[in-house]
Each structure stands twice: as C-alpha cells, then as structure tokens.
Amino acid sequence: MERLTWKKLVGELILFYLPWLILGVIFGYLPWFLLIASWIQLGWHFHNQLKMSNWLWKDRSLTPPSGSGSWEPLFNGIYRLQQRNRRRRKELTTLIRRFRNGAESLPDAVVVFRSEGNIVWCNKLAQQLLGLRWPDDSGQPISNLLRSPDFVRYLSRQAFDTPLEITSPMNYDRTLELRIMRYTEGEYLMAVRDVSQLKQLEGMRRNFFANVSHELRTPMTVLQGYLEMAQDPEMLMGPMWDRAHGVMTEQLARMNALVEQLLTLSKIEAAPTIELEEMVDVPAMLDILEKEAMSLSSNKDQSFTFDVDNSLKVFGDNDQLRSAISNLVYNAVKHTPNDAAIHVRWYRSPTGPRLEVTDSGEGIEAQHIHRLTERFYRVDKARSRETGGSGLGLAIVKHALSHHDAHLEIESEIDKGSTFSFTLPSRLVVDTTLPHTATNDH
C-alpha cells in the first residue's frame, strides 16, 4: 500500500531504459533500441489499462488484479477507495434503515419532501392517515395528493412556525395536525398527528364546565331572588315565608347533591389503581339500600323485589362499590313512574358475581344508551330536573366499575323497562371457608 511518487516513477523509467541505452551504445543502434524500449513500455501500460478496465467494469471480484511497478499502487489505491466507499454505503444504508424503522415506530405520520414539493419518503401511518401510496407516490408533488385549500396555502407561504389543522382525506370525522420543519438541505419533514380525540376531549371539557355552570346557575338565581326579597320584610310575611323557605331549602339541597356527586366522581377518577383487598359485604349493603329506596319512593307506590345471595361477598373498594350500586338503585326509583316494579338481583353467575337492577319503566331509546355514562347527559332533561337528577350518576358507576375490572351493561326496550347490570371478576369472590384475614390469597 505504498503511495506512488514522482521519484519512484523517474527511478522506474531510468532502471527500464538504462539496459537499452547500454545495448544501443555497444551495438551502435541507439535510436532503434530506445524505440523498441518505448514500444515495450507502451504495450505494458496498455496491458495494465485493459486489466484495470476489465476489473472495474466486467470482473465482479473485489480483489484487485496483480500488478507490477507503478501500476501496483494504483490498483491497491483504487481497491482501498472501493473498500472505503463500501463501508460508507453500508453505514449510510444502516443509518437510513434506522431512520425509517424509527419513523415507522413513531405515533405520528411522517412525510419527507423536497423544497419544490416532491415526495421523497413516507411511513406507513402517513399512508393510512393521508392516503399516500409508497413507493408509487415517490416524486409526486404533495400538493397534488393533499388537495386541502388550507394545506396548499400553508405550503405556498413557506411559513411553518405554527401547525396547521386539516380534515383527514381518508375520514372526514378525523382532524389532523400538521407540522413542517426543515430536514436537510432542500428537504422538509412533515409530521402529522391525529388530534381527533384531543378535540373531542376539549369539547367534553367545555361542555362539562358549561353544564356545571348551568346546573348551579338555576338554584343560585332562585336563592339570589329570595335574598333580594328578604331585604323587604313585608315581602316574606305569612305564607310567603314558608314557601320561600321551602324553595331555598330545596335548591340548596340540589346544589349540595351536585357538589357531592362532582366530588365523588373526581375522587374516583383520580384514584390510583386499587388493590381490591377490602372485603365488601354487598348483601348487607343491599339491605340498607332497600330501606333507603322504599323511603325515597315515598308515595310513588313502587314495588321492590330484592333477590340477594346473602353468602356472596366480594373483595373491592367499599366506597366505590356502594356509589355504583346505590346510583343504579336510586336511578331506578327516580326515573320510573308510579306503580313501577323494581327488581334487584345479586347472584353468582358462571362468569362471576353479578348485580342486575331491572325496572318496568318507559324504557330508553337505542340512540341514547351508548351516551348514558357521559357526564350530564340526560334522555329527558326536563324530567331529570324534576326528579333531582344531575346526570353524573352513571358516570360515577362507569368509573367505579372500571376500577374493579368490570363494565356497565344496559339493556332497554321501550314501554317494557330497562336492566342495568355488571359482573365482577370471579377472582374477587370471598371464599367464606377461609379466615377473612387471608385477603391476599384471592
């Protein structure tokens, strides 16, 4: 691997021509001897040039051809450059593979395009969200494939400081957020994220605060009106005071119930994963709820049937299970008409402990069922306010059950009634044959 120098070339020529020069002087034909030597030198160089050409263009072997003299360092030097280029190509290929694998693993769609807009590469998620096809769309202008007017204007402005939101061309119910940044010289990288769920959650948050404000505004307005009337004692004389006192007490109770349910829901949602090691006496809980339901029913003449397996106790969170079960029972009392029949059943099903609350009320239309666990959602808002419903009960049930690896099931038929039920995992059943202290063996 010696480097070719001019000294070595001159020395090689002197050594080659010196014997011919001596022979020419001895025999007296110096020009002819030098001419023959030059032809031999040219022939040798042409032969090595052909060997190099065959090696570079025809021969698939990586090993350089054998050479002598000044051609040996040339062959070896070219071979060394080839080795270096192969290593660089291998490193570059590995780097590109890592980039693409990393881009495929990202939760965002990624598109690389040139400054003129032609697509260089995109990952699989970009094909799903944007409808691109790879490698068919390689070199295609991205503005021809994403025809949103907002995106075309955004691309033409070349001002990418703020992200852009557009509707997904594959699903008009999805909202996409686009961010474009410089990638390499003359290329841009576009990251696309599906923000539909974030938009939905933001809408739910706004609706939540709007609903809370609306729910609190009515009782506060009533209280404010009566307090203003109280400035004139003559306005609240006699029967008027009794009526005002009753209404204010009712509105305060309504506000207090709403705040209590909001605190309960917030506590359940914020609770970390619970161990479910506390023994919950569901039969005793249902015995108390039966008495409370009869008291709540008062003069509605509703009939109650509690079919309870008194030996069936479970492990869980007592407060959360009580919130879930009581809300289901109270809802059946509040939202069913007079003379309705309410049947509560707690039994051991093949899949685990199961609670069913069935009523013979008016039933719920199918389009409302999947939204019943949303905060403040009401099927009949006017009737719910009359019965004191806040629209938070089933949301509390949903989150409490999720902490116990269960979910709320709702079946309803118009004019026949509804059934609200859930099934707890079999592993939560308390084995009454074991001491209650052995709660870790469930």
Image: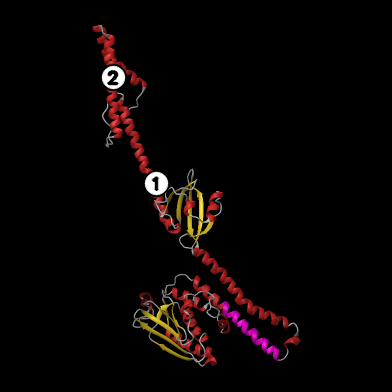
Magenta range is 239-259
Badge 2 density bin: few <14, some 14–19, many ≥20, Cα 10 Å: some
Q: Position of residue 220 (x, y in %)?
A: 65, 78
Identify the residue at horizontal 27%, vertical 22% (top origin): 44
Location of residue 408 (image quadrant): bottom left
Residue 1 visible, this orientation: no
Callouts 1 and 2 close, C-beta under 8 Å: no
Q: Which residue is mark 1?
A: 95
Q: Quadrant of residue 38?
A: top left
Q: How is the image coloured?
A: secondary structure
In the rendered structure, which amino acid carries the disc numbered 2? Gln
Residue at x 39%, y 43% (from the top left corner): 92
Where 221 falls versus 23 (above or below)?
below
Q: Quadrant of the N terminus?
A: top left
Towards the viewer: 83 or 36? 36
Q: Is residue 55 above or below residue 330?
A: above
Q: Which residue is mark 2?
A: 41
* Residue 411, disc: none
Give the side of residue 67 with respect to residue 267, left or right: left
